[in-house]
């Protein structure tokens, strides 16, 4: 499954806990491009750009949402702040 135009939802950087929201492609329950919110992400690898959720789903992450990019720049955050292999 692929998640595009994604962003973090309910993120706690210190605990590295969060969900993802984005447009999903290749999911058997949702139409391509449908906006979804994942269950809690239990591993997030910035080198492979793969995230695994508590429900057992794996997401290949495409481009981040522009809002997330802008927020990260404004607050001096980087993807590695969320890295949880």
Image (cartoon, rainbow, N blue to C red):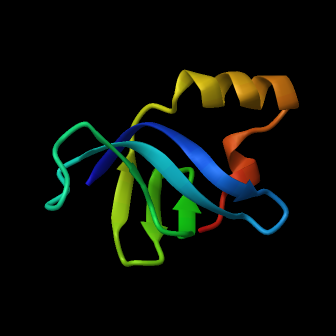
Horizontally, is 3 left or right of 13 in the view? left
Q: Residue at x 36, y 78 (%)?
A: 56
Up-down relation of residue 34 to residue 54 (above or below):
above
Direction from residue 11 to residue 47 in the image, left or right: left
* x and y percentages locating residue 80 in the rendered image: 71, 49
Q: Nearer the viewer, residue 37 or 53?
A: 37
Image quadrant where one finds the N terminus: bottom left
What is the quadrant of the C terminus in the image? Answer: bottom right
Q: Horizontal placement of 7 versus 84: left or right? A: left
Q: Is residue 75 above or below residue 80?
A: above
- Residue at horizontal 47 percent and vertical 77 percent from the top: 54
Total count of labels:
0
Q: Is residue 37 above or below residue 72?
A: below
Left or right, residue 43 beside residue 61: right
Residue 72: image location, x then y, percent: 74, 31
The quadrant holding residue 25 is top left
Residue 48 position in % (x across, y down): 46, 52
- Tell which of 18 and 62 is nearer to you: 18
In front of the other: 65 or 34: 34
- Pick out the residue farthest to the bottom: 55
Residue 73: give x, y in percent of width and height. Answer: 77, 24
In terms of image quadrants, where is residue 10? bottom right
């Amino acid at each position: 499954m692929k998640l595009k135009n994604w962003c973090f939802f309910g993120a706690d950087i210190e605990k590295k806990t969060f969900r993802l929201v984005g447009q999903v492609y290749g999911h058997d329950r949702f139409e391509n491009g449908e906006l979804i919110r994942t269950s809690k992400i239990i591993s997030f690898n910035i080198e492979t750009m793969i995230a695994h959720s508590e429900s057992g789903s794996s997401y290949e992450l495409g481009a981040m949402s522009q809002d997330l990019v802008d927020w990260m720049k404004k607050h001096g955050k980087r993807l590695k702040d969320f890295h949880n292999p």
